[in-house]
Amino acid sequence: MMTFHVLWTVALFAIFIAIVIWAWSSKRKKQFDEAARLPLEDDVEKLERKDG
């Protein structure tokens, strides 16, 4: 039973590392930058409607 727990822990750690590498890869930078600007763009649209 102990072997199962060790293998499960190692597998989950490997998945975690893979997700970190995927998230920090340079291929994803553009998508994350666009997602980071979404709240600001929404605020600009609200201000434009309020002023107009």
Image: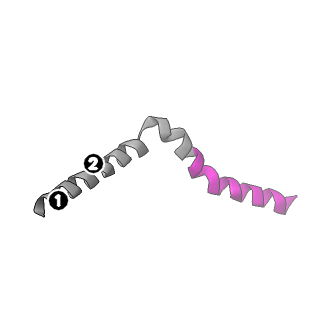
Q: Could you tell me residue 9's position as x and y percent?
A: 21, 57
Which residue is identified by label 2?
Answer: 14
Type of amino acid under label 1: Phe
Q: Is residue 48 on the magenta stretch?
A: yes
The residue at the far front in this view is 1
Neighbours of disc 2 within 10 Å: few (<14), some (14-19), many (20+): few
Q: Is residue 31 left or right of residue 22?
A: right
Q: Residue at x 34, y 45 (%)?
A: 18
Residue at position x 25%, y 52% from top?
11
Between the C-alphas of marks 1 and 2, the distance is 15 Å
Colour convention of the picture: one colour
Q: State the quadrant of the N terminus.
A: bottom left
Q: Quadrant of residue 46?
A: bottom right
Pick the residue in front: 52 or 15.
Answer: 15
On screen, 2 above or below 18? below
Residue type for callout 2: Ala
3 w.r.t. 34: above or below: below
Quarter of image, res 3 = bottom left
Residue 30: percent from left, percent from top: 54, 39
- Left or right for 38, reference 44: left
Mark 1 lies on residue: 4
Tell me, for residue 29, which label it has, or none: none
Provide the secondary structure element on which disc 2 rests: helix
* Residue 34 at x, y percent in the picture: 59, 45
Q: For the stretch drawn in magenta, what is the main secondary structure?
A: helix
- Decide whether residue 47 is among the magenta residues: yes
Point out the stretch of residues depicted in magenta.
Answer: 34-52
Dot 1 alpha-carbon crowd within 10 angstroms: few under 14, some 14 to 19, many 20 or more: few
Q: Secondary structure at mark 1?
A: helix
- Residue at the image position 21 percent from the left and 52 percent from the top: 10
